[in-house]
Image (cartoon, rainbow, N blue to C red):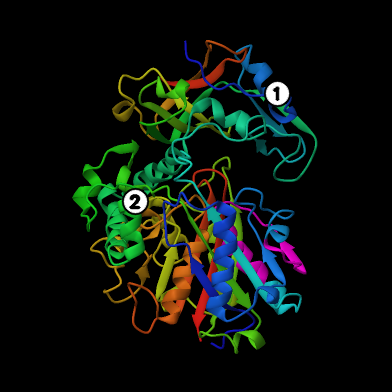
Amino acid sequence: MNQARNAAIVGLYEWPKRVDPDVSAMEIKALSIHRALEDAGLKWSDVDGLYDANDGEGGGGLGLAPYLGLHPRVIDTTSVGGTSYEFQVAHALRDIAAGRVNVAVLSYGSKAASQRIPIGTGGPRGAGNWQANMENPYGSTLISNYAMVAMRHMHEYGTKSEQLAEIAVTTRAHAMRNPQAVQAMQDLQFMNIREITVADVMESRVIADPLHLLECCMVSDGGGALVLASPEIARGTKKKPVWVIGSGEAIQYKRNGGDITTSAAAQSGPRAFAEAGVAPSEIDIAMIYDSFTITVAVMLEDLGFCKKGEVGDFVTGQNLRWDRPGLTLNTDGGGLSSNHPGMRGLFLLLEATRQLRGESTSQVAGAKLAVAHGNGGMLGSTHAGGTVILAAD
Amino acid sequence: MPNRPQPMFPEHDTQAFWDAAKTSQLTYQVCKDCSTVVFSPRAHCTDCGSENLDRRVSKGAGTVYTYSVVRQNRVPAFAEMGAYAVAYVDLDEGFRMLTNIVGVGDPTKDVHIGQRVQVEFEAQDSGEYPIPVFRPV
């Protein structure tokens, strides 16, 4: 099927260090934007669309443009947690196709590791609002929120911890091929920086039943930037454009009688595939938000790579490694083993683009189609799902 | 006594729920126009948008829909509890709430999906609102 070519990713930059005391979150954003524009062969003054998730310190709608020194025509501050960037790509696609933006920039900067922010095991959030007042008394951590999804998935479908562990084993294998990910694990003082086994995962301590330590993402510093452009501009940039051919957005939340094992991806995925005119079976690369193993498991199902309840068998035997035929998962090492500064959605787009350019450290030969699916918020309660489908030139 | 984080006010949507908790009542809402059960509390029906909601008292009996046992929480009130079970409980009246399962010897072994549980109101060391938690029956 002939896919629309209305906007392309033309530049990218990923902040290389995962523990970086010598830079602020805002500096990570600005310098990443500059280097992503250099990657594209575009100028600072070419930027006329600014997309920002209110991250960094002093950023946001009123903060980032003055800090950068830009006067964008479109300012989009969509902020839906870790998948803000998939939503923003969807909006940039729309804005570029409408002729309102020629060069769109997304950026991210975080010092979560240096500031020792306890993302997964931290305290109450959003005191004194309608959700927090019903949740904070119970001490459900971010990790236990996701763990409750895993527990129900195991109950409904017989999924085993050993099967979920396969996801962590695959992403670690990819991380060991990515020098920045290896450096990250060293800087964050990981034990046993090597390829791991299912047994390693099962023997790591339980953080919140049934999730083990090695099923949980790291907390790192980091950031990066992404540049999108119109077809006219994309034809003249330094590297081959990677086309945004479909996108989908959705929100899911706790509902009376609802199914906790089905995520927002079940809504956003079909929207994105329909827009792109491709089927899940045609996808080469799946960059899926791996905050935890269960996150990937549920989303592989919801995006249609396997049937609901069958992900345990689907991931068993390391089928999603870069050197196996068929679908390949999280080739940068993911949040589990490369970087997770709190909102990982940008990195999904960066690595998907690198794969379609032929620049990954675990390059899949001839990769033509990639999916980036992000998750923001909490999988077991309120969360956002953003799906972006990318095509090589 | 436990010393959990208290709900914080002013917060209009949840005020009546927590006021009722002071008299050991677990309340939920039903839409007078379309009969949809609404929880957590708010001013409108989530199915039809109606502003005509009836506040009712639950019998407090339900079933564990899913759970996890928290082994690590850096918040002092929870760090002191040791391992504890968080759960979604489906009340018989048709609403689902986040809660804790208490009164079990070992939460890693004694809590199960499908388990029948009953609400109780746990007094707190400080703060005026008792917290509704559930115990296996």
Q: Which residues are magenta?
A: A68-92
User: Is A205 left, or right, of A275 in this rendering?
Assistant: left
Q: Which x, y percent locates residue A48? A: 72, 72
Q: Is residue A108 visible?
A: no
Tell me: residue A178, above or below residue A58: below
User: Label 2 belongs to which residue?
Assistant: A187
Q: Is residue A81 magenta?
A: yes
Q: Which x, y percent locates residue A163? A: 28, 54
Tell me: residue A159, above or below residue A127: below
Where on the picture, by quarter, is residue A320?
A: bottom left
Pointer 2 indicates a residue of which chain?
A
User: Which of A379 and A262 lies nearest the eye of the viewer?
Assistant: A379
Between marks 1 and 2 in the image, the one whose residue lies nearer the viewer: 2
User: Is A43 left, or right, of B77 in this rendering?
Assistant: right
Q: How many marks?
A: 2
Helix, strand or loop under label 2: helix
Callout 2 amino acid = Asp
Q: Residue at x 61, y 65 (%)?
A: A106
Q: Which mark is residue B9?
A: 1
Callout 1 amino acid = Phe
Q: Is residue A288 magenta?
A: no
Q: Residue at x 66, y 88 (%)?
A: A232
Instruction: Check disc 1: other Cα within 10 Å, few if <14, some if 14-19, many if 20+.
Output: few
